[in-house]
């Protein structure tokens, strides 16, 4: 657990460094690209370590995968997908990495867990585990609104492309995990991901291609 805490501290330091570097610079600036990649690599290691810990303790307790509230024990999962307005393929490289970070932070803030996910060039695809007191429509609205505003503030080229308006198309897809099993949904999301035992649970399309996945 000490290593996990150390990585968390390193992530926070790299985020602050990223904010300092990005002042007035475009995402194509070499220094921004290097800093973003370093942050993304540490985030990947953090996720992998979390998965190793979970795997090590799997089966040691009953109802291990269930969440707990003050008066409830629950296991609610939704399969959600939304796309960019006009299906513009803008979620690549540093923008895709930053979006993934924002979605992780947003989900953590409202108590939502990303079970599996993928950022495509023109869409976001996630399997999420949610508390009982938040409707899926509220979750998606919160994530879309927050990420749109922050991405346009940080990347002027996106703001220019969308004239400062919302970068996400109206609406979204949502399905409960029940009739279609959780494993089926995860396998669908993982179709372009690595086939090793330990995977990044929230992939970016560019990363898949760079590593030779099809």
Image (cartoon, rainbow, N blue to C red):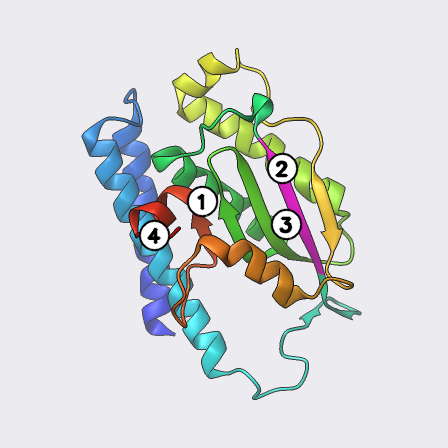
Looking at the rendering, the stretch of residues picked out in magenta corresponds to 77-83
Q: Earlier in the sequence, mark 4 or mark 2?
A: 4
Asked which secondary structure carries label 1, the reply is: helix
Disc 4: which residue: 11
Mark 2 crowd level (few <14, some 14–19, many ≥20, 10 Å Cα): some
What residue sits 27% from the left and 26% below the top?
28
Q: Earlier in the sequence, mark 1 or mark 2?
A: 2
Q: CA distance from mark 4 to mark 2?
A: 27 Å
Asked if the stretch drawn in magenta spans residue 131, the answer is no
Q: Are marks 3 and 4 in contact (CB under 8 Å)?
A: no
**Numbered tag placed on residue 101 in the rendering:** 1
The residue carrying mark 3 is 110
Q: Residue at x 52, y 11 (%)?
A: 163
CA distance for labels 3 and 4: 20 Å
First reached walking from the N terminus: tag 4 or tag 1: 4
Q: Nearer the viewer, mark 1 or mark 2?
A: 2
What is the CA distance from the residue labelled 1 to the residue labelled 2? Answer: 17 Å
Residue 152 appears at what percent x and percent y?
47, 23
Nearer the camera: disc 4 or disc 1: 1
The secondary element bearing badge 4 is classed as helix
Tell which tag, 2 or 3, sits nearer the viewer. Answer: 2
Chain-order first, disc 2 or disc 3 = 2
Label 1 crowding class (10 Å Cα cut-off): few <14, some 14-19, many 20+? some
The residue carrying mark 2 is: 82
Task: Name which of mark 3 and mark 4 comes first in the sequence.
Answer: 4
Residue shown at the point (72%, 58%) measured from the top left: 131
């Amino acid at each position: 657990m000490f290593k996990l805490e150390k990585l968390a501290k390193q992530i926070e330091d790299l985020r602050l460094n990223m904010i300092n570097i990005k002042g007035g610079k475009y995402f194509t600036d070499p220094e921004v690209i290097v800093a973003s990649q370093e942050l993304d690599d540490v985030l990947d290691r953090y996720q992998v370590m979390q998965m190793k810990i979970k795997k090590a303790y799997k089966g040691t307790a009953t109802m291990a995968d269930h969440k707990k509230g003050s008066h409830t024990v629950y296991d609610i999962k939704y399969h959600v997908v939304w796309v960019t307005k006009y299906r513009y393929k803008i979620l690549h490289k540093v923008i895709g990495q930053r979006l993934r970070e924002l979605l992780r932070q947003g989900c953590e803030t409202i108590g939502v867990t990303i079970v599996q996910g993928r950022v495509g060039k023109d869409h976001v695809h996630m399997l999420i585990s949610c508390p009982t007191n938040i409707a899926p429509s509220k979750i998606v609205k919160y994530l879309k609104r927050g990420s749109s505003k922050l991405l346009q503030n940080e990347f002027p080229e996106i703001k220019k492309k969308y004239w400062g308006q919302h970068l996400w198309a109206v609406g979204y897809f949502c399905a409960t995990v029940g009739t279609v099993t959780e494993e089926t949904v995860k396998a669908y999301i993982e179709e372009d991901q690595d086939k090793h035992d330990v995977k990044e649970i929230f992939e970016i399309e560019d990363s898949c291609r760079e590593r030779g996945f099809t």
